[in-house]
Image (cartoon, grey):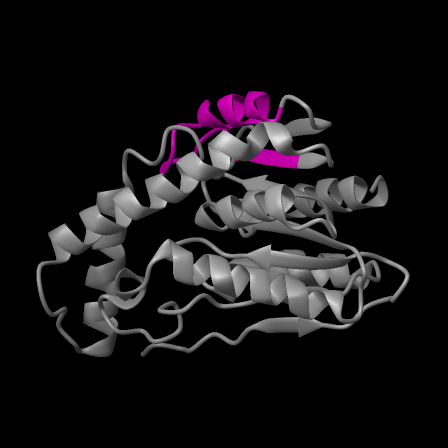
Amino acid sequence: MLNYPEPIILPGRPDLPGVVLFHSFTGSSRDMRLLARDLNAAGYAVSAPIFSGHAEKTPLGPLNYHPADWWREAQAAITAMQRNHHYVAAFGLSMGGNFALRALETMPNVIGGGAFATPLVDGSPYFARTVHGYVDYIERESGQRADGDVTSAIDAQRQALRHFAHATIEAAGSVHVPVFFAQGGQDSVITPGTALKSLHLFRHAPASLVWYPQADHILTADPRSQVQLGRDVLGFLGRL
């Protein structure tokens, strides 16, 4: 049986930057639950929206939407946070990291942020396999069957995500605010070395990379990285 996630909205101290967290392609706000809790316990207001297609739990789910849709939703989440917090930090896991980085490039009140296990430069060599597994899981749990050509839909989504990432890459040199990258050494979804390539793109920013040698892809939930990641993000926020 499928449980439907809810967006996370946690109020915090008005004198601290608000924090917005963006989830992965096959994930939801659940990706960010533990990190949101840790940041909120330290006084930060936290929001973790759910992108369109990720709470519907139909087999094609996010494949029915486009990165441009999610980017608009990411901007809206940051704008909503700015109603109570003039300055905002934005972070994202995997695909969500692309939106956080784009926010650093284009939204002046975003004063820092970063990406966790984000396939910015090289993409994910296992994207099709991962998404096929997601579709199969939803079919089993929901009792529904996917309509249409799943393989073609996955390929179209992969190309759209790469197009969005390329635009982010092109603007990386314009970023001057602090950038935080996190990467697991045992990542089974993306090539771990891509994080270092991403770091070097932000050549005019104070950018840092934290390595979690034993962790897999979902750094925000992996017990080999989750606690330390929270500490590292808090340390980063404290320097903004």
Q: Position of residue 206 (x, y in %)?
A: 73, 27
Q: Does 75 appear above or below 225? A: below
Residue at 48% over, 32% down: 169
Q: Position of residue 174 (x, y in %)?
A: 63, 32
Q: Does 130 appear above or below 38? A: above
Count of residue discs? 0
Q: Tell me if residue 223 can be seen.
A: no
Does 17 lie within the magenta span? no
Q: Name the image quarter holding the N terminus.
A: bottom left
Residue nearer the viewer, 166 or 208? 166
Residue 145, by quadrant, is bottom left
Residue at 24% over, 77% down: 142
Relative horizontal placement of residue 182, taking residue 111 as reference (left or right): left
Residue 11, by quadrant, is bottom right
Relative horizontal placement of residue 3, taking residue 110 as reference (left or right): left
Relative horizontal placement of residue 158, taking residue 173 as reference (left or right): left
Q: Tell me if residue 121 can be seen.
A: yes
Q: Residue furthest right?
A: 15
Relative horizontal placement of residue 22, taking residue 84 as reference (left or right): left
Residue at 26% over, 43% down: 159
Q: Position of residue 52 (x, y in %)?
A: 40, 69
Q: Does 174 appear above or below 52? A: above
Residue nearer the viewer, 118 or 71? 71
Q: Position of residue 111 (x, y in %)?
A: 75, 46
Residue at 83% over, 42% down: 240
Magenta-drawn segment: 180-202
Residue nearer the viewer, 134 or 123? 123
